[in-house]
Image (cartoon, rainbow, N blue to C red):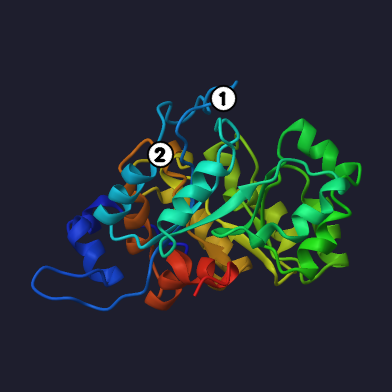
Amino acid sequence: MANTIDRRSLLGGLTGLTATLGLPRKGGAQSRARITDGQVHIWQAHGDRPPSASGRQEPLLVEELLATLDANGVDRVVLVPPSWAARGNTYSLEAAAAYPDRIRVLGLAGRPAEDQAEAITHWLDTPGMAGLRMFLSNDAGAEYLASGGADWLWPILAENSIPVSVHAGDSLPVLAQAMERHPDLKLCLDAFGLGRNVEAEEALARFETVADTMAAFPNVMIKTGVIPRDSGDAFPFSNAQQLVGRVLETFGPQRLMYASDMTLLKSPYAEGLEFWRVLPDLPDTDRDAILGENMNRWLEWA
């Protein structure tokens, strides 16, 4: 994975993407592995706070989302309701109910208190709900974890096989302790486990901390970050190729899950998929795993 690829190798463009990923070609159908986008925010209107300043400001409705996925040969999507959505998890769950074959939801859980134990135990009873998402990389989240605020939560999630996707920031040691105590916990680290506002030139070195702290736990998955934005390079994002190479070396291809985080993209959606086509030395079986099979397995989404 040490080699990178330049633009001269990209003459096939998106036609090459269709061929290599096994997408249906003009003139005949071709079987292929399903692609699942592991994280997209949708919302109808924002509440008291506006959307993230670094991303899209206007609402993204499910119809526009599905049109984009269809145009790029993406079969499924995991919705992560944004914290600014006026209706919380509701709109995403309505979308999952309307399109049950294509949509699942990692419901935003905030920083739940122990009096919510019953609700968490039955979290997956809601149609379309596939797990929890917790944004804990801010000061309040770090304090919640450091003070033991989630100590009651981990055993419930482990015992009930409820996946949890965490944006953890600098709190990886606390999550490592949770994994030591509850090895069956289905934990995913968002954004390569790097936390917020990590500069592209710092990402590779910072990931070594992620690997040192979390790679030994086989139940820990890694969700990709917004590669086209976070790289800082032009396509094909050569510095991100180096980061992904290190992720594959330490966690392996069966523990990495593709996520576009579409509303934070600054470039065409297709480039995020093309990145995986041109990634050097990546076998087709590993690409299929990263682009969908791993997420489907993690969520037990047949």
The quarter holding residue 160 reads: bottom right
Residue type indicated by callout 2: Leu
- Residue 16 image point, x, y percent: 21, 63
36 relative to 300, above or below = above
- Residue 288 image point, x, y percent: 41, 72
In the rendered image, which residue does mark 2 sit on?
A: 265
In the rendered image, which residue does mark 1 sit on?
A: 47
- Residue 287 image point, x, y percent: 41, 70
| Mark in front: 1 vs 2 | 1
The quarter holding residue 85 reads: top right
Identity of the residue drawn at 87% across and 45% down: 149
Q: Is residue 161 left or right of residue 250?
A: right
Residue nearest the viewer, comparing 200 with 129: 129
How many residues crowd mark 1 within 10 Å: few (<14), some (14–19), many (20+)? few
Dots 1, 2 in contact, CB < 8 A: no
283 relative to 43, above or below = below
Q: Is residue 29 left or right of residue 41?
A: left
Identity of the residue drawn at 55% across and 40% down: 201
- Residue 218 image point, x, y percent: 70, 72
267 relative to 256, above or below = above
Residue nearest the viewer, comparing 247 with 259: 259
